[in-house]
Amino acid sequence: MSKRRELTDFKCGEIVGLSKGDFSQRNITKILDIPKSTVGEVIKKYNEEGLTTTASRSGRPKILSERDSRHLVKIAKENRSNTLEKITENFNTSMAISVFTRTVQRILHKEGYSEYTAKKNLLFQKKITKKWYEWCCMWKNCFTKWDHIIWSDESRYELFNNNSRNWI
């Protein structure tokens, strides 16, 4: 089963031109590789209405104008670490229009912005690395205490930090 697609105005013009040149529908079908039913419909429409163009279709109007989209991008650029929900909330409070997060996501994606995980900030500051080095130097020759340790269980506990990915 083939996909249906709309003929361009040029193709419709070719069909009409060939039919005026005394070509049969079967010959037009072979020349342009278009189904016979489509050729017949285009010729019929031209004979009845004199049209070779397709009618414009109505669709749902866009909720945001170009100006609103630019404002949304500006809000997203203000703080790159904001989540999609926070960007939507900021946009809805600053504008009279209320949109869903999916709408904001679609518009930002169309403008070239996509989500990514936040980079974890490893705090390798000079002060902290110096303290780590001093601690290691202090305990490197202390084998007497390590001889009495049988088993050590290391667990990670985070009280105020979320270990999951942060999407920004």
Image (cartoon, grey):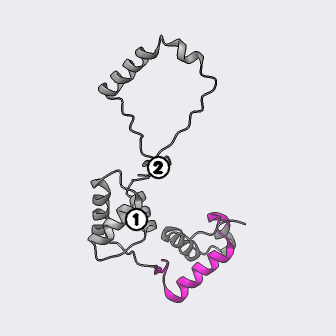
| Position of residue 139 in the picture relative to residue 19 (left or right) | left
**Is tag 1's residue or tag 2's residue first in the polypeptide sequence?**
1
35 vs 168, nearest the viewer? 168
> In which quadrant of the rendered view does residue 87 lie?
bottom left
According to the picture, the residue beneath numbered tag 2 turns out to be: 162
Q: Could you tell me residue 104's position as x and y percent?
A: 40, 65
Circle 2 SS class = loop
Q: Could you tell me residue 154's position as x and y percent?
A: 56, 33
Residue segment shown in magenta: 30-59
Magenta-colored stretch includes residue 58:
yes
Kindly identify which numbered label has been placed on residue 132.
none
Spatial CA distance of label 1 from label 2 is 25 Å
According to the picture, the residue beneath numbered tag 1 turns out to be: 104
Residue at 35% x, 72% y is 64
How many marks can you see? 2
Magenta-colored stretch includes residue 105:
no
Residue at 46% x, 66% y is 102
Closer mark to the observer between disc 1 and disc 2: 2
